[in-house]
């Protein structure tokens, strides 16, 4: 290879690309390492279609090479014209039939998988959770258990969990790459599918529909835990009463500031209301907050003081509540981080991201 793109440059580019792409495959954020029923089903289809298409490519490439070598113009045959076969019925039939058969081989399992994943006939035998998308966060309502959480969705491993998806504002799309395909989240109807995780872990979820300035920050987590731990978590959440928390003096002051600054008009702590902002019942147990921030006190203080700076266009506008001093924000952060109803948390399951 000559010119500006010498061999060295080409290799360097390829190497860089490999390095970049290898960063895309976290164990808990890739459809290519399936950890659940839906993603396994997608993976099977990916393998099937890749095999079919690669076979077609190889056969065509092989035929091309054979024809190029065997039927090239030879010395002494300059005027030779080979037998003309256009309009040959057997040939036309063969290369019309083969693609049709291949398309059927790919289409039948695809359609069957689609129907299987959207099947709601047996939903009454399984757990249901209502998922609501907001700009730019997710709310989870475990109606049967009368629990609400935001941003962290807990599910038991090895069980189908039906999710009813709806939106409070614009179109979103609910996607947990490791566990299942995407499903649209619409304001005008409810879309239903199920997920099932095969392994314990914290799976990363994304909004997959451009929904506004902070679309890219509309992350959530699925915490798949052992079924016994799940029951424990449910009972911890049900019996949690924030009024009974034993708080130190600073956190107690933070609690009073939280109430005095009207935070409760949008944020419930427990209960089962129609939410305006994320429910903070298990805020101290969350693996992230504001979608992408590590749950440190520093981050939380920055967030309370200027949420718009971190997550542009989100509804927790700094001008919607009185200005909060850094000192007060620190106290409120102390309080919020005490909201830890359960020992079953993102930290109590294996960390797939580091594997
Ligand atoms: Cu919600 Cu993108």
Image: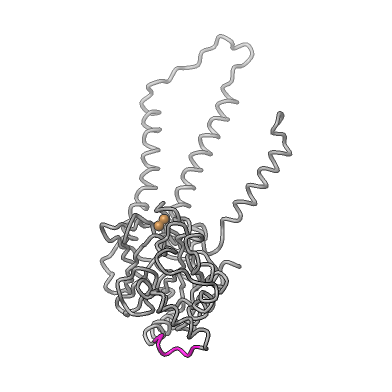
Can I make out residue 156 in this image? yes
Secondary structure mostly taken by the magenta-highlighted segment of the chain: loop
Q: Is residue 305 left or right of residue 315?
A: right
Horizontal and vertical percent position of residue 279: 39, 73
Q: Is residue 15 left or right of residue 160?
A: right
Q: Residue at x 56, y 73 (%)?
A: 296
Q: Residue at x 54, y 72 (%)?
A: 326
Q: Is residue 347 left or right of residue 210?
A: right
- Residue with the most extreme right position: 8
Work out which quarter of the rendered image holds the C terminus and state it: bottom right
- Corner quadrant of residue 259: bottom left
Q: Is residue 30 above or below residue 149?
A: above
What stretch of residues is rendered in magenta?
240-247
Horizontal and vertical percent position of residue 262: 38, 74
User: Which of 49 and 74 lies nearest the eye of the viewer?
Assistant: 49
Q: Residue at x 56, y 61 (%)?
A: 26
User: Which of 283 and 227 lies nearest the eye of the viewer?
Assistant: 283
User: Which of 314 and 12 lies nearest the eye of the viewer?
Assistant: 314
Q: Is residue 329 magenta?
A: no
- Corner quadrant of residue 156: bottom left
Can I make out residue 201 in this image? no
Q: Is residue 93 above or below residue 262?
A: above
- Residue with the most extreme top position: 79
Q: Is residue 165 above or below residue 228?
A: above
């Amino acid at each position: 290879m000559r010119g500006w793109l010498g061999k060295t440059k080409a290799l360097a580019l390829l190497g860089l690309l490999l390095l970049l792409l290898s960063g895309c495959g976290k164990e808990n954020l890739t459809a290519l390492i399936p950890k659940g029923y839906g993603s396994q089903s997608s993976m099977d289809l990916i393998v099937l279609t890749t095999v079919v298409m690669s076979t077609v490519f190889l056969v065509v490439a092989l035929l091309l090479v054979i024809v190029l070598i065997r039927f090239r113009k030879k010395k002494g045959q300059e005027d030779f014209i080979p037998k003309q076969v256009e309009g040959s019925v057997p040939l036309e039939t063969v290369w019309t039939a083969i693609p049709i058969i291949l398309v059927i081989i790919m289409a039948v399992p695809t359609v069957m998988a689609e129907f299987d994943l959207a099947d709601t006939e047996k939903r009454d035998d399984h757990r249901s959770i209502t998922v609501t998308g907001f700009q730019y966060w997710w709310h989870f309502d475990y109606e049967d258990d009368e629990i609400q959480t935001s941003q962290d969705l807990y599910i038991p491993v090895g069980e189908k969990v039906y999710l009813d998806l709806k939106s409070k504002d614009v179109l979103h799309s609910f996607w947990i790459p490791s566990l299942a395909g995407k499903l649209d989240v619409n304001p005008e109807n409810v879309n239903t599918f199920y997920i099932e995780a095969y392994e314990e872990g914290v799976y990363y979820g994304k909004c997959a529909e451009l929904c506004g300035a902070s679309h890219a920050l509309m992350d959530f987590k699925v915490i798949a835990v052992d079924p016994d731990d799940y029951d424990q978590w449910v009972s911890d959440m049900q019996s949690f009463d924030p009024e009974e928390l034993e708080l130190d003096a600073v956190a107690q002051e933070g609690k009073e500031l939280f109430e005095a600054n009207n935070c409760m008009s949008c944020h419930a702590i427990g209960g089962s209301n129609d939410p305006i902002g994320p429910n903070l019942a298990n805020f101290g147990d969350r693996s992230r907050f504001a979608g992408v921030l590590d749950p440190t006190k520093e981050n939380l203080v920055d967030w309370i003081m200027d949420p718009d700076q971190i997550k542009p266009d989100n509804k927790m506008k700094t001008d919607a509540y009185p200005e909060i001093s850094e000192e007060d924000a620190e106290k409120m952060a102390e309080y919020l981080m005490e909201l830890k109803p359960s020992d079953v948390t993102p930290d109590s399951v294996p960390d797939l991201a580091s594997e």
